[in-house]
Image (tube, rainbow, N blue to C red):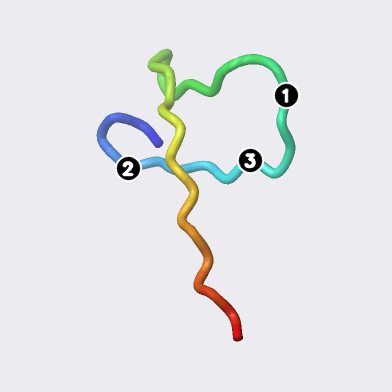
Amino acid sequence: MNAAETLELLCTSSGTGELSCDGTPMALKAAKPLPASD
C-alpha cells in the first residue's frame, strides 16, 4: 500500500526486489485472519 493509501496491490507469488509507486517504496499490509469455520 502506498503512503496515501490510494493504491493497493495483490501479489500472488513471491520474489526478490521491492515494489514502489512513483519511486516511493510501498509498505506491506498485514494479512487479515479468516473467520473460523465450524
Position of 6 with respect to 31 (left or right) is: left
Image location of residue 34, percent across then percent down: 53, 66
- Residue at 50% in and 72% down: 35
Q: Which mark is residue 4?
A: none
Q: Amino acid at mark 1?
A: Gly
Q: Disc 2 to disc 3, how far (Cα)?
A: 17 Å
Q: Which mark is residue 6?
A: 2
Q: Residues within 10 Å of mark 3 (few under 14, many from 20)?
A: few
Judged from the image, the secondary structure of the residue bearing numbered disc 1 is loop
Q: Disc 2 to disc 1, how far (Cα)?
A: 24 Å
Image location of residue 4, percent across then percent down: 25, 35
Position of 7 with respect to 12 (left or right) is: left
Mark 2 vs 3: CB contact within 8 A: no
Q: Nearer the viewer, mark 2 or mark 3?
A: 3
Closest to the observer, 37 or 7: 37
Judged from the image, the secondary structure of the residue bearing numbered disc 3 is loop
Image location of residue 31, percent across then percent down: 49, 48
Q: Disc 3 to disc 1, how far (Cα)?
A: 10 Å
Judged from the image, the secondary structure of the residue bearing numbered disc 2 is loop
Q: Residue 21, relative to residue 6: is it above or below?
A: above
Determine which residue is flagged by label 3.
11
- Looking at marks 2 and 1 on the same chain, the residue that comes earlier in the sequence is marked by 2
- Looking at marks 2 and 3 on the same chain, the residue that comes earlier in the sequence is marked by 2
Determine which residue is flagged by label 1.
15
Task: Tell which residue pokes out farthest to the bottom in this image.
Answer: 38
Q: Residue 18, relative to residue 35: is it above or below?
A: above
Q: Nearer the viewer, mark 2 or mark 1?
A: 1
- Residue at 49% in and 59% down: 33
- Residue at 43% in and 39% down: 29
